[in-house]
Image: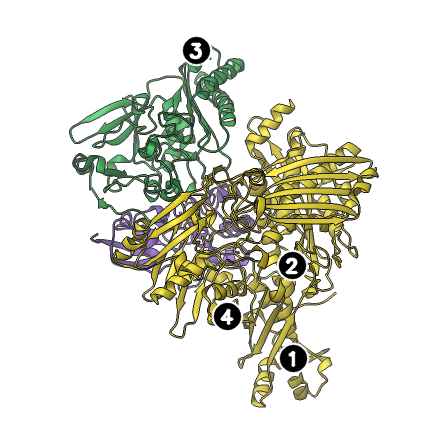
Chain colours: A yellow, B green, C purple
Amino acid sequence: MSDYAIVGKRMPRVDTPAKVTGEARYTADLKFPRMLVGKVLRSPLAHARILSIDASRALALPGVKAVVTGQDTFGEKWGVFRYTQDQCFLPMDKVRYFGEEVAAVAAVDEDTALEALELIRVDYDELPAVFDPLEAVSPGAPLIHENFPQNINIHVNINVGNVEEGFAASHLVREDTFTAAEESYFQGEPYAVVARFDLEGNLEIWMPNAGPHMKAKPLSNALRIPLHKVHVRKIAIGGAFGGRSEISPADFICALLAQKTRRPVKIVYTREENTVCTRQGHSMITTIKTGVDRSGRVLSREVTCYMDGGAYSSTGPIATSVPFLCMEQAYKMDNVRYNGFRIYTNKPIRGMIRVHGRSFACGVDTQLDMIAEELGIDPVDIRLINAREAGEYTPTRSYVASCAMKETILQAAQKAGWKGKRGKLPKWRGIGIGCNSVQTGFPMGIRGGSQAIIKFNEDGGATVISGVVDNGQGNDNMLVQIAAEELGLRPEDIQLVSADTELTPTDPGAYSQVSTFVGGQAVRIAAGDAREKLLRIASEMLEARVEDLVARDRMVFVKGSPQKAIPIQKVIRTGLAKGRVVTGEGSYWPKVDPKREWVQNPYGQMCEAFSFGTTIAEVEVDPQTGKVKVLEVVAAQDVGFALNPLVLEGQFEGAVAMGGQGGMLTEYHFWDKGRVMNPTQLEYKVPIAQDMPKIHSIIVESHDPKGPYGAKEAGMSIAMSAAQAYSAAVCNAIGVYLKDYPLTPDKILKAIKEKA
Amino acid sequence: MRLPKFQYLEPRELEEALEMRALYGAQSALLAGGTDLLVRMKQRLMKPSFLISLKNLRELSGIRIQGKEMLIGAGTPLKEVAGSALVNLHFPALAEAARAVGAYTIQQVRGTIGGNLCQDTRCLFYNQSAFWRSGRQACHKAGGKICYAREGSDRCRSTNQSDGATALMALQARVTLRNSQGLRDLSLEELFTMKGETPLDLAPNEILTQIRLPMDRPGGASAYERIAYRSAIDFPVASAGVWLESEGGTISKARIAVGCMGNAPLLILQAGESLEGRPLEDTQALAKAARIAMDQASAFAVENVGATVEYRVEMVSVLVERALRRASARAAEEKRGEGS
Amino acid sequence: MSRVPLKLKVNNEELELLVEPHWTLLEVLREELDLTGTKEGCGEGVCGACTVLLDGKPVRACLTLALEAQGCSVTTVEGLAGEKGLDPLQESFIRHGAVQCGFCTPGMIMAAKALLLENPCPQEEDIRKAISGNICRCTGYAKIVEAIAAVASQHDPAAKGSVGTLKEEPA
C-alpha cells in the first residue's frame, strides 16, 4: 500500500475559509462600474405563436438602456447534440412552455427594469397545449416541434441477447409499472449571469456552471463571435447537481444586452425562475418485466420508460439512457431490452439530475424485493446473487475494471444489523436496501478530455492551471491535494487557476461525474511532468539519479536519506537561474469507444470506470398519519480510492438527504396545467435539519486501475441507492409495495388502509 | 424579489398609529413582523401605499393577567408566547401553536402572535408571484370572478392555515380592535368573516391590539396538534385545537376547533357537545368526537394547500383525537394535583 | 421616490445612509454596503440564506425593511471574524467539513451564532431545531450539526463572545 503524504487524508477544503467569512464571490455578488440590471420577460402561456412584440414604451422609459427580442438574434437553434437542435434562446416563432424567454431589458436599476418589463407588449396566438407525456404521443395531440412527430424527442432502443428466450427459461416472471413525478434541483444559489464586453469585443461572462468550456462554445456560436473571444470566468458556484451544464438562454441574453449597451449587465433569477426556467428532473413511467431462475438470478429483463422531457430536448439522449445504464452496470443481465422514450410536453425543460429516474431505480429494486419475497430469499441475498463483479462486461459491452459492489452490500448490511432486523422489527418499523451504480464519464466528443499546466514558482510553491470547475462538491480542493501530493508540496503552497476559458485548457466539466477521473488525472500527469523536471535539476544538485529522488513535504531527497535534503524552493531557483523549464503539462483522454452513440449505436465502452454503492435505511411509519421517521441510514460506496474521506462523507450525507429524505419522502412538483404550483422551497419540500437521521458512511475502495490513485466518482451513486433504500424500508414497514413516488404521507396512509 | 414602492410611517405610540390608520385607511397596511405581509407584497398580491410600522409600539407587547383575563399584546413575539410560564400553565395549546410556527429564526423577533392570528388566508392558486398569476383571469381573492381551486365556485375558497388562530378559537379568545375613536371587543368567531376574499372583520382604520383569554374557567385543559410534511417552515395542512373543562373527572364543556379546512378556523359545536358529561378517560367518546369533527370539517376543504383533501380530512380525526387525549390527560393530572 | 435617513450600526460600524422605504435590509447590505456575504436564496423568508442578527437576534433580512433596522445593531457574517481571527463557529465549520457549495453557509453560521448566544450548551436536538429554518442542499446537515456541537462543547461559561454577550451560566 502506498504511503501518501496528502491524498487520502482527511483535510479541510481549501475553498472553505472564503465561504465561512462571506468573502467567496458568487455571480450575484459581482458589481462593476456602470453595471445595468437585466430582467427577462417570460411567456405567460404554455404554447402560443408570437405574433408581435412592441417594446417601444419600454425603450422610452427613462433608465432603460436596451430591449432585446428574437429579432436581435441570428435565429440559430441550439442543441446539446446536432440532432437535438431545437431551441432558440429568444424564440421568434412560438413559445413552448409557461416561463419561456420572450424578451429582455437592461436598465439602470431593478425597479426600472421591472417596470420596463410591464411596458413590453407581446401579442400571442394561444395554441392548444399538452401537459401529459402519454397524451402528447397520442394521435391528435398538439405538435410542439415540427420535425419531431408524435412529440417523441428521443427513442433509445437497446437490445442484448434474447429476452423472450430468457423469460421462457425463467422460473418466475414479474411485470410492474412504476411512476414518479419530477423532482427538482433547488440549488442553494438561484441562477445569475454577469456579462461585459471590452473594447476589443472580448466577452467576459460569469454564471454558475458545470463546465465553462461547455458554455463558451455555444455562446460563441450563438453570438457569432470567435471562441477565443469568449471568456467564461471562474466564480464560486452554489451547487449544480446536473442542472447547470448546458448553456442557458440567460447566458446568451445577458451577453446580448451587454453587447448592445456596451455596459456590464447582471441578471439574477428569482427562486421561481431558477425552478421553472432552468431545468427540472424528468417525471417517468417505467414498466419493468423481469424473469429470474429459482435462485433469484435475473435471466431476462425488459424495460419501457416514458419520460416527460418538457418543451426542449436539453441532454435528451443522455437523460433517456442514464437510468438504464445505471441499472445495467449495477446488476448482471445477459438478456435485456430497453425502450426509452423522451417525450415533449409544454412544460419546463428537463435535464440530467443527480437522482435520475426514481421510478426506474426504485422500480428495479422494488421488483427484486418482490421477487425475493416470492422465492423466500432475503433481499440482501438477491442483490448479492445479481451484483456486478469486476472483470465483467455490461450488457452494452462496457468493461468493468474495478467493482466492489458485493463488498458495499456486505459492509452496509453488517453495519446496519440487517440480519437481526429484517423481518424481525416491531410493527410499522422497516428496513430496506438499495443498490446502484453510476458512470464516471460519458463520451463527450472533443471536450471529453482534460489538459493541465503546472508551473513552479520562485517562492517554492506552484500554480495549477486546469479547466476543472467546482460546483461546491470540492473539485478545487481535489486538484490542490493531487498537485501537492505529486509535487512534494503542501496544500497551502498551491495556487489554483481554474475554470476560466481564457486562461485554462479544455476540460469536460463536472458533467457525468468525471472531474476527478479525467480532470484530476490530467493534473496528476502534469504534476508528474513538472516533478520530473524538478528532479532532473535536483539530481544535478544532489549528484544522484532522478529515479532515486523523492519530492515530499517541500524537500527533495534521495530515497532513504531524508537528512540530505534540499528545499524544493532552492531547486526551483537554481533551475530558473539556469533557464531550465520548471513547468509541466499533462493531458488525459478517457479510453471510451468513440463509435458509441446514445441513439445510433448504444454499445461499446461507455466510460472507464463505474462506482457502485449500497444504502440501507431503517424507518418507522406512523400508521395514523403515514408520516415516516427515518431512524438510521448506512451508505456504503465503492469509490475506488478515497482522496479525502472528510469530503466523501459530506457527499454521502448530502446524497442521502437529496435522494432519500427528499427524493423519496417529500420532493415532487405538482401542476396547474403548465404552471408549477410549488416553485419555491416553501411548497417544494427539500429536507431540513430536524428531519434528517443519523447517517453512517462506509467508504469501500476497489482501487480502479485507471482512476487517479484508483479513485472513481463519489457524488451520485449514494443519491440513487438512498432513494431505493428509503423506498424499500417504507414498503417493508407497511407490508405493501409502493410503486408511485415520492412516498408522501397521504400515499402511505392510503396503502395502509387499503391493505387492512 | 423586489418590493413595490410605498411610504413608510413610523408612529411612536399607539395613538399616533391609530391616527394614521384613520387617515390612510384602506391604502395602508400594518407592519408587525412582516413575514406574511412582505411576501404578499413581493408577489404583488397587496400594494399598500403606506406601511405603518408597529415596531416602536411597546404597548402592543407583553403578557399579563388582569382581573379575570390573560392579556396578550398582539405584538408579542411568538417566542415569548411559546416560552411564557403563564401561557404554558393556563393555555398550553397556545404555546404549542406558537412553537409550531415557521422556524426558530422566524419566531425570535419578527413573528408576532397578532401577525399569526391575522395571517391572511392561503391558496396555492393565489399565493404565487405576479408572473405566475399572469396570462389568465384573476381569482376571487385577487379581485376577479373565478376560483381555480374549486371549479365553478362563486366565492373564494382560500384556507386559513394559522396555528395561532386555531388554538385561540378553541381557547375562546377575544380580541380588542382599536381605532382612533374607540374600540371594539370581538370574539374570535366574530373576528372571522368566513369570506376568503376578506377573512377578517378588521376595518381599514383599525389595529388589533390585544388578545384576551378568559381565566375564570376552572378545570381547563387544552392541547394543539398540527400536521405538515416537514418539522419546520411548513404551514400545516390540517390542525386542531381543543379546550376541555372538567369537574370531578367529567367533561363539562369542550371546544374543538379545526384549522386548515375553511376560510377560518372551524369551531365544531357538535363535536364539543358530544363530549359533555363524558368521563375524561372515555377514549371512545373522544374518538367519536374526533370523527364528528372530521365529518363536519370535510365539507369545507378544497385541494389548495398541498396534500390531498382526502388526507387532510382524515388527519382532522387523527389530530382532534390526539389533542383530546392530551388535553384529557392534562385535565386528569391537574385533578390529581388538586387532590394532593 | 425620496430617500429617508437610516442610522444603524453594521458590524460595529456606525452608519448613516439614505434609503428608499421599500428597500429591504438584505438589499441595503448587499447593494449599498457591498456586504455580499449575506445571500438571497429565495426572497420569501423560507431558505434562511439571508439570516443576519438584529440586536443579537436572528432575522430574515429579505423580509426586514431596512428602515425597520433604524437605530439597531446589525451583525452579518462579515462581522464575525475579529482581530484575533475567525469566530470559533467559522473555525469549526472549516475543520468539520461543514461547507460544500457555501451558499447557505453565512446564513447558517448566523443562525448558529444566534443559538449559541441564547443557549451556549445546546443538545443536538436544540441545534437541529435552531437551524431548521436554514436550508442546505449539499451537506445533509450532518457536519453542520457536528461543527456547531463542537463549539458548544468548548463553551467556557466565563468567556464573552465576539458578538453581544454570552449568557453567563448560574454559579
Q: Chain of mark 2?
A: A
Which residue type carries mark 2? Phe
Horizontal side of C115 relative to C67 (left or right) equals right
- Residue A707 lies, in percent from the top left, at 69, 63
Which residue type carries mark 3? Glu
Please determine if labels 3 and 4 lie on a single subunit. Answer: no
Q: Pick whichever of labels 2 and 4 is earlier in the sequence.
A: 4
Q: Viewer-nearest of labels 3 and 4? A: 4
Q: Residues within 10 Å of mark 1 (few under 14, many from 20)?
A: many
Q: Residues within 10 Å of mark 4 (few under 14, many from 20)?
A: some
Q: Pick whichever of labels 1 and 2 is earlier in the sequence.
A: 2
Please determine if labels 1 and 4 lie on a single subunit. Answer: yes
Question: Residue tagged by mark 2?
Answer: A442
Please determine if labels 3 and 2 lie on a single subunit. Answer: no
Q: Pick whichever of labels 1 and 4 is earlier in the sequence.
A: 4
Question: Residue tagged by mark 3?
Answer: B276
- Residue A730 lies, in percent from the top left, at 63, 35
